[in-house]
Image (cartoon, helix red, strand yellow):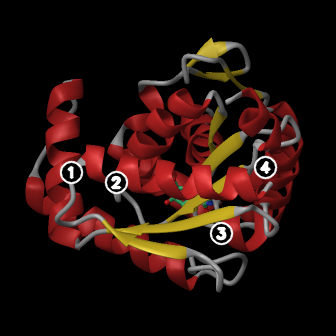
């Protein structure tokens, strides 16, 4: 067993896909099981959007958004809490208004450069799992395992609806569905690093799969890749 363990090498795992496809739920569990670091890159775009909302920065003014990047420090702890300038904003950044603002600022080149640089640096620890939109295509093009996690709009809207309800956030199924469709469109059609399946990514449609089933599939693939070193 020990010999086998010596041969296993910690890898980088990229999970991309549209909004509310369940990427973070899967990534968190897989990271825990493998003893990997989980990096929620969407949370970083959310922090930028949230900062702009809090400070009355016009989200449509790209120059104004670029100018505030120097004021933003994002950190995450091992419990997946997200800190913006040392304040825990983990719950606030999940609001629907912040989702839309994150999607908007994520189309700006300066914002992407600012965050991608940090994401690469954070990934330099060996044994990481990142979820987002451009991980397999841009952030970690050499990741040993790339997953493109998808699900139907209906499934995603229902999942987000239940999640919001659990968090005590306002939840209206039709609004959530429209928001998801709009974000899909924005994220897939922006000029810089649009959401796209990497050529070497494995597609997982989770519409009819339980969390356990998806986790097991990703774990199986990750272990294969770890063995290959
Ligand atoms: O994964 P999420 O829903 O928390 O992401 C919020 C927004 O951030 C999403 O609509 C698009 C953007 N995003 C991105 O452009 N690139 C990433 N790697 C992650 C998120």
Q: Mark 4 and 1 residues: CB-CB less than 8 Å, in contact?
A: no
Residue 214 sits above or below residue 92 on the image: below
Residue 149 sits above or below residue 58 on the image: below
Q: Which residue is mark 2?
A: 214
Q: Which residue is mark 4?
A: 115
Tell me the residue at 55%/17% (across/down): 79
Q: Which residue is mark 3?
A: 107
Give the CA separation, mark 4 to mark 1.
32 Å
Sequence-first tag of 3 and 2: 3
Tell me the residue at 40%/56% (across/down): 217
Q: Can you tell which mark lies on residue 210?
A: 1
Name the spot of residue 162 as percent of width and height, x first. 14, 41
Foreground disc of the pair 2, 4:
2
Instruction: Determine which quarter of the picture holds residue 124.
Output: top right
Q: In this view of the protein, which residue sits in the foreground, 194 or 210?
A: 210
Name the spot of residue 155 as percent of width and height, x first. 17, 63
Determine if the C-beta at disc 3 is less than 8 A from ligand 1: yes
Q: Mark 1 and 2 residues: CB-CB less than 8 Å, in contact?
A: yes
Name the spot of residue 110 as percent of width and height, x first. 83, 60
Sequence-first tag of 3 and 1: 3
Foreground disc of the pair 4, 1:
1
Locate residue 104 relative to residue 152 in the image: left or right. right
Locate residue 146 relative to residue 62 in the image: left or right. left
Name the spot of residue 49 as percent of width and height, x first. 58, 45
């Amino acid at each position: 067993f020990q010999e086998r363990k010596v041969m296993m090498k910690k890898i980088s795992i990229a999970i991309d896909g549209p909004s509310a496809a369940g990427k973070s739920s899967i990534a968190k569990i897989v990271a825990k099981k493998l003893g990997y670091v989980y990096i929620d890159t969407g949370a970083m775009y959310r922090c930028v959007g949230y900062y702009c909302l809090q400070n009355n920065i016009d989200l449509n003014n790209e120059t104004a958004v670029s100018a505030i990047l120097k004021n933003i420090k994002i950190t995450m702890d091992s419990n997946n809490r997200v800190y913006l300038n040392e304040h825990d904003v983990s719950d606030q950044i999940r609001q629907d208004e912040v989702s839309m603002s994150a999607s908007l600022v994520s189309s700006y080149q300066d914002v992407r450069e600012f965050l991608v640089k940090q994401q690469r640096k954070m990934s330099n620890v060996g044994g990481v799992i990142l979820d987002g939109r451009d991980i397999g295509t841009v952030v970690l093009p050499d990741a040993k395992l790339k997953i493109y996690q998808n699900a139907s709009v209906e499934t995603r809207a229902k999942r987000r609806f239940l999640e919001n309800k659990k968090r005590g956030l306002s939840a209206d199924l039709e609004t959530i569905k429209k928001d998801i469709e709009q974000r899909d469109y924005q994220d897939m059609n922006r000029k810089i690093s649009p959401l796209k399946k990497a050529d070497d990514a494995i597609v997982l449609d989770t519409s009819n799969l339980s969390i356990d089933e998806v986790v097991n599939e990703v774990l199986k693939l990750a272990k294969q890749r770890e063995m290959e070193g």
